[in-house]
Amino acid sequence: MQPLRTVRSRTVVIPLANVDTDQIIPARFLTTTTKEGLGKQLFADWRYLPDGTPNPGFILNQPCAAECRILVAGRNFGCGSSREHAPWALLDYGIQAVISTEIADIFRSNSLKNGLLPVVVDEPTVTWLIDHPGAELTIDLDAALLTLPTGLTVAFPIEAFARHCLLNGVDELGYLQSKLADIERFEAETATCKR
Amino acid sequence: MAASTLFDKVWKSHEVVPETAATPAVLYIDLHLVHEVTSPQAFSLLRSLKLPVRQPQRTLATMDHSTPTTTDQVFGNVPITLDAAAKQVRQLEQNAAEFGVELFGMRDARRGIVHVISPELGASRPGMTIVCGDSHTSTHGAFGALAFGIGSTEVGHVLATQCLLQRKPKSFAINVEGKLPAGVTAKDLILAIIGKIGVSGGTGHVLEYRGSTIRGLSMEERMTICNMSIEAGARAGMVAPDEVTFAYLEGKPRAPTGRQWDESLARWKTLVSDPGAAFDMSIDIDATAIEPMVTYGTNPGMVVAIGGVIPKPSGDAIHDKALGYMGFQGGDAMLGKPVNTVFIGSCTNGRLEDLEAAASVLRGRKVAPGVHLLIVPGSQEVKRAAEAAGFADVFRAAGADWRESGCSMCLGMNGDTVAAGQYSLSTSNRNFEGRQGVGARTLLASPLTAAASAVRGRITDPREFL
């Protein structure tokens, strides 16, 4: 994974609450056995008309969405299924950060493991962002600060270890493997107790 | 020692390394369930790092999401219709063989939906940590296990180390008191709970379902409740094990026996929240006031009592969008809305008691003309039991389509889908836009309500058939 320190981009806004992972990538695309190339199926049922042509009414098909790396969404983004295909699809499309008042647990965890930054901020900030689509933002992961074009900065919570991994481009698996002696000790201690 | 919750106890007993400000806990995983959709990328990770599966005996694989439900595709010589699905099935067969993981493959008599087969084997037991690359892993919390869904990267972590890095979630007590009225099921109760706390009401929390109502439920009913914890956004849902749990487990193929059973039982009996244990949140629910519930919108929290009306547009964008998608007018009655397809099955309501409930309504009756009633057992074991009990004959006589087990129309990955614009009354867990097929309109309800509505061809209160 590449180290991630700063995301600087205009925003694309999907103001709806409870955008679920079936919308982010519908189940019929989950028969893939790899992670690659899912960006073209991102938001497929909103993005394409039944005949497969782009739906001009959907935000990602509008010129203003081009090159946007930050998605702003209503509360509870990424709810539903545990499919990691959701962050894979967002990343493959080019999104690097999602901002909302609330981000669903499994989606947030999956995002952090792939370098997609989940940014949870307060309601007034998200309301401002929804009212100002295309705003140029800077997300500083090291400082855990979001900077609005007005100059206002907003802190966001980020789990310390995930932040460390993202900043340094290191994988959590390496850390888990470094705990092998502890894992073996735990297994030995609990071996007598049939779980 | 401070009073602990059930969740605290299970968490604590699986901490390999406790969490600190800088690092999450290293949590040991007792049982890892694997299916074909979320595991290929994880096995690829192991292969690229030249890592083995660390504890194959704690890993159990099956195929359920992409698998066909027609007998000729499962057991006959007809190839799987969808090429990508067939490839995914073959990939899991290869991965399981290469990594030495036990697989209940396509024609195995023990195959089924992963969340149905593990309990019926006695592999899901009190006090365990259980994970799967599937959000409905919360089902196994019905046994007093800490069970939750994970992504494919984490599937790789568990395969490689048998552990996960986790921050400890908060706790949320759902206290339910009183007897559920006749015709009101566990599905109605959990839909009512989600309607009350909302689809993100449980985010960051592990729910513990408590109280006399929960104590009075069977294991299958508890599984239905815990299964949908994720639909309230919760990390997991749990029920403290009791005599109902122990009676269910005793004699199951993988349950302990003899002296080990006695030792396990003694330990399991300690798995209750201590009197005075503090929860971060709590809510009280009166079970006696709950009615059969039906969803009207595009998430499981958009739900009303079956005799109620669809809420009017409120200016809330998500509500208005949902009504538009569903083709409903605010203020309309739920009762009498037409249905085209009825699906009875899934990890929520695909167990024997669910099929028994459906059979109780369908016995001696016919599915309404023009309605497709698809009944898909949760496992091959459920299928055999339903056939032995005569339920399958009732379904066929009623004109229902009775299939081999799998996830099927819950998410339509295997091609069992609902056509655009059609109304599907479904006993599954998600009514998201397009969940059962592009443009499909899903209404969630109990197996009783589903069967009653299949007979009438419109949303029907099952209490009319009691």
Image: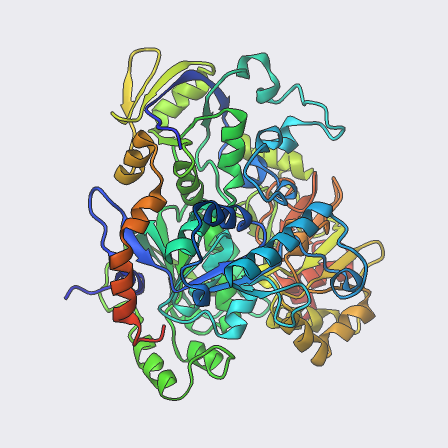
Residue B312 seen: no
> Does B217 appear above or below A8?
below
Front residue (pair B409, B174): B409
Residue at position x 39%, y 29% in the image: A2
Q: In the visual, does B172 lie left or right of B130?
A: left
> Does B187 appear above or below B220?
above
Q: Quadrant of residue B260?
A: bottom left
Tally of numbered tags: 0
**In the picture, which quadrant includes the C terminus of chain B?**
bottom right
Tell me how the rendering is colored: rainbow
The percent coordinates of residue B101 (x first, y second) are 51, 63
The percent coordinates of residue B304 (x first, y second) are 56, 50
Front residue (pair B142, A172): A172
Work out which residue is located at the far top of the displayed protein and give it: A150
Residue at position x 57%, y 64% in the image: B103
Work out which residue is located at the far bottom of the displayed protein and give it: B258
Work out which residue is located at the far right of the displayed protein and give it: B369
Q: In the visual, does B304 lie left or right of B400?
A: left
> Does B40 appear above or below B55?
above
The percent coordinates of residue B318 (x first, y second) are 54, 33
**In the picture, which quadrant includes the N terminus of chain B?**
bottom left
Front residue (pair B364, A133): A133
The percent coordinates of residue B28 (x first, y second) are 33, 60
Work out which residue is located at the far left of the displayed protein and give it: B1
Residue A14 seen: yes
